[in-house]
Image: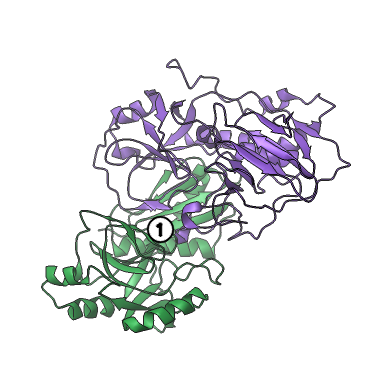
């Protein structure tokens, strides 16, 4: 790692089973892009890869050739000056340098390596939880000078490419509750009518939303209860905080709604200052959407093709209903 | 309170739901939560990935590919109707504590506030048999019920941004065992070398929700030696017969 920006760390799908002991899950903020990168290099969708934050990074390969795939937040990238295409595999020869610039319009990119990253999982996962000092192969975010041991590329194999549907700009879907009864009807309406801005103070623990304060109907303290990924918690100042992978497991503020698990990856990719709108759906609609998303995730490897035989069907992926409701999150007009 | 009241179920997005028994800190509510949690451990429902018991509710994470919210809610209400109130005690732990001084910087203030000698605060705190209501906030942070009411003290107005690993504290009517350094608004009575959470140790987590905890005062000069043993992955805490 010649140069590593902040919030760049090894992440897989997360660490589960310890939430009853207060152990947070960590895990990739954009599972879709992680799964896509893993599909390209032939790894299982949940395998660990490098989650690259918004700033520039440079990696040098030593001791052999490495095959990589880069997905997620788009940004200029090159291998020894050769432009690197997103959503494709590429070979980095021994001694070559991968140069990744700042992200454009989104936050996190995912760099997967053929053969994976060497390390001992902790409680079943590589995912780095920096605040808790957990993760593999380093119990912290990556830093300049770190050396990661990764798989050797099969140099006889050809390069592959993945057809992905156009980005969905629809509103981020939520299910109201579990404490929506702690808010006024006006606050419930404002949650969905406001064009919120992502605060610059956001991190892997949570994204703060800037907008009009949401009014509580019966106080802002509850007896602590469990917290899920994507819960929208509203503390006393009325400014919502969306809790993400590095959140605590329990908390004492009311949660007005929870973002659908299948929309979390889109939400997490909205940069500081970016706009977001929410749309409440029923639990049944939410579950239909999450089932379609899981099916699309599982189908990713089937949409990986030979980079020279460029006939992959983007329509097939679109048909999996990933695009959702085609409403622009950035306008006032639903 | 009518303890036969059925709990309420609410969605937490598409992949979790919460079963609420009430909205207060109440030993009876917590026993029902832990009873349902134990029942689900004995009668596993395929598709439930993990459960998080808290004071008054059970958070159930599940796979929406395998379970439908309405069906799971119905199954959980049936389970809650027969799971009852957990009367079986879990493991009882004895946790050594160095009280006061640099180990418990609020002991003197708590004693003065309640017009007791420091020894009396220690005696009352270490005489209690506490129940682990829940673990949360940070790995291994145990929220305990059973504090002597004479020691109940509102939380600090100015929470500390950092309190040490192993802190033994009280806040309101609750007591706590804290594993990692963390911010806290509770009052610090002492420290234990015991690590309720330690990666690489088997078991990684020492106490379960529903376990019991007792505290044994130890001399300050024992702390460093016990801390070194804990660092080498010894449990230090002892299991004792209830």
**Residue B97: image location, x then y, percent:** 33, 77
The quarter of the image holding the C terminus of chain B is bottom left
Colour-to-chain, green: B
Left or right of residue B42: residue A118: right
Q: Is residue B23 above or below residue B91?
A: above
Query: Relative to the observer, which residue lies in front, A5 or A38?
Result: A5
The quarter of the image holding the N terminus of chain B is bottom left
Q: Is residue A34 above or below residue B116?
A: above
Q: How is the image coloured?
A: by chain
Circle 1 packing at 10 Å, graded few (<14), some (14-19), many (20+), is many
**Residue B129: image location, x then y, percent:** 31, 76
Q: Residue at x 55, y 30 (%)?
A: A106
Query: Relative to the observer, which residue lies in front, B103 or B141?
Result: B103
Query: Relative to the observer, which residue lies in front, A273 or A60?
Result: A60
Q: Is residue B221 above or below residue B42?
A: below
Q: Residue at x 58, y 47 (%)?
A: A9
Residue under label 1? B136
Left or right of residue B26: residue B49: right
Colour-to-chain, purple: A
Q: Residue at x 59, y 56 (%)?
A: A138
What subunit carries mark 1?
B
**Residue B31: image location, x then y, percent:** 36, 65
Residue B217 visible: no
Q: Is residue B134 above or below residue A88?
A: below
Residue B131 visible: yes
Left or right of residue B54: residue B48: right
């Amino acid at each position: 790692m010649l140069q590593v920006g902040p919030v760049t760390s090894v992440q897989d799908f997360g660490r589960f089973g310890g939430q009853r002991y207060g152990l947070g899950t960590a895990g990739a903020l954009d599972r879709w892009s992680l799964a896509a990168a893993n599909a390209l290099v032939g790894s299982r969708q949940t395998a660990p890869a490098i989650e690259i934050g918004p700033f520039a990074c440079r990696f040098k390969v030593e001791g052999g050739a490495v095959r990589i795939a880069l997905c997620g937040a788009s940004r200029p990238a090159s291998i020894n000056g050769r432009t690197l295409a997103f959503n494709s595999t590429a070979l980095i020869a021994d001694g070559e340098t991968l140069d990744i610039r700042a992200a454009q319009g989104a936050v996190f990119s995912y760099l997967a390596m053929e053969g994976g990253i060497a390390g001992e999982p902790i409680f079943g996962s590589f995912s780095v939880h920096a605040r808790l000092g957990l993760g593999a192969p380093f119990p912290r975010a990556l830093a300049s000078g770190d050396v990661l041991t990764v798989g050797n590329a099969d140099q006889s194999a050809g390069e592959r490419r993945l057809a992905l549907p156009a980005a969905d700009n629809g509103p981020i879907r939520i299910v109201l509750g579990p404490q929506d009864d702690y808010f006024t009807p006006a606050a419930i309406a404002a949650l969905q009518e406001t064009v919120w801005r992502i605060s610059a103070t956001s991190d892997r623990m949570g994204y703060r939303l800037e907008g009009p304060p949401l009014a509580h109907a019966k106080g802002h303290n509850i007896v602590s209860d469990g917290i899920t990924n994507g819960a929208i918690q509203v503390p006393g100042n009325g400014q919502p905080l969306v809790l993400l992978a590095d959140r605590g497991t329990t908390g004492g503020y009311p949660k007005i709604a929870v973002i659908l698990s299948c929309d979390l990856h889109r939400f997490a990719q909205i940069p500081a200052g970016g706009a977001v709108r929410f749309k409440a759906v029923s639990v049944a609609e939410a579950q239909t959407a999450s089932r379609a998303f899981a099916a699309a995730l599982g189908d990713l490897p089937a949409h990986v093709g030979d980079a020279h035989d460029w006939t992959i069907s983007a329509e097939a992926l679109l048909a999996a209903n990933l695009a959702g409701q085609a409403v622009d999150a950035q306008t006032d007009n639903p | 309170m009518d303890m036969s009241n059925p709990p309420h179920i609410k969605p937490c997005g598409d992949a979790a739901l919460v079963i609420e028994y009430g909205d207060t800190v109440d030993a009876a509510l917590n026993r029902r939560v832990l009873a349902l949690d134990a029942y689900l451990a004995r009668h596993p429902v395929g598709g439930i990935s993990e459960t998080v018991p808290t004071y008054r509710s059970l958070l159930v994470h599940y796979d929406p590919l395998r379970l439908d919210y309405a069906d799971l809610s119905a199954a959980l209400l049936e389970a809650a109707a027969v799971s009852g109130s957990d009367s079986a005690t879990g493991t009882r732990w004895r946790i050594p504590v160095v009280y006061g001084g640099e180990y418990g910087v609020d002991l003197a203030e708590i004693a003065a506030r309640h017009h007791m000698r420091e020894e009396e605060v220690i005696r009352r705190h270490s005489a209690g048999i506490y129940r682990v209501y829940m673990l949360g906030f940070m790995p291994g942070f145990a929220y305990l019920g059973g504090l002597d009411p004479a020691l109940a003290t509102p939380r600090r107005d100015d929470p500390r941004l950092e309190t040490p690993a192993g802190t033994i504290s009280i806040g309101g009517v609750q007591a706590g065992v804290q594993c990692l350094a963390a911010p806290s608004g509770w009052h610090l009575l002492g420290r234990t070398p015991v690590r309720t959470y330690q990666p690489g140790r088997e078991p990684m987590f020492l106490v379960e929700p529903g376990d019991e905890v007792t505290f044994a005062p130890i001399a300050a000069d024992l702390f460093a030696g016990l801390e070194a043993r804990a660092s080498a992955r010894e449990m230090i805490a002892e299991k004792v017969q209830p």
